Image (spheres, rainbow, N blue to C red):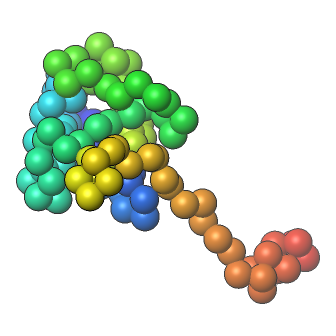
Amino acid sequence: MSMYVRIKRQKTTIFLHCDPIDKISTLKERISQLTSISVDKQKLFRNEDSEEDLTDNLTLEELAISNDSILYLVYYDESNEQWESIDIPKPSYDEDEEMQEEED
């Protein structure tokens, strides 16, 4: 049974078609093909506030990751010699939109 997962990093979302038997390492390989960032420079997390990255040799099914789940991606920053933090900006609304919502 195929499914989709969303991979978020900063202002980018990647939609990956995958199977529950796919390993995290397989997802990283697909991300690498799209972004040209090597697999060893990527970490995937289940939550925005998670401190433990997902293990490469486990499958999506073993991790209970289901269709339309969101995973968070960070890269290794070689210039600072450390991993990025998870940074997903919240949508911002312009004041006119906010006022319109309040009137409704």
Residue 21 picture location, percent across and down: 17, 21
Quadrant that contains the C terminus: bottom right
| Residue furthest front in the image | 80
Q: Residue furthest top?
A: 62
Q: Is residue 99 above or below residue 72?
A: below
Q: Name the residue at 82% across, 80% down.
A: 100
Count of marks, rendered view: 0
Eyeballing the image, is 89 above or below 6?
below
Q: From this view, report whether residue 67 is shown above or below residue 64.
A: below
Picture layout, residue 76 above or below residue 25: below
Left or right of residue 95, residue 18 in this image:
left
Query: Which residue sits at x=26%, y=58%?
Result: 79
Quarter of the rendering containing residue 80? bottom left
Q: Residue at left 44%, top 46%?
A: 85
Occupied quadrant, residue 49: top right
10 displayed left or right of 39: right
Which one is nearer the viewer's eye here, 71 or 16?
A: 71
Position of residue 40 measured from the top left corner of the image (x, y, whole percent): 15, 39
Residue 70, quarter of picture: top left
Which one is nearer the viewer's eye here, 74 or 70? 74
Foreground residue among 34 and 50: 50
Residue 10 in view, yes or no: yes
Any part of residue 7 in sight: no
Question: Left or right of 50: which side holds 24?
Answer: left
Q: Residue furthest right?
A: 103
Image coords of residue 65 (percent x, y): 36, 26
Instruction: List x then y, in percent, for residue 78.
Output: 23, 53
Q: Quadrant of the N terminus?
A: top left
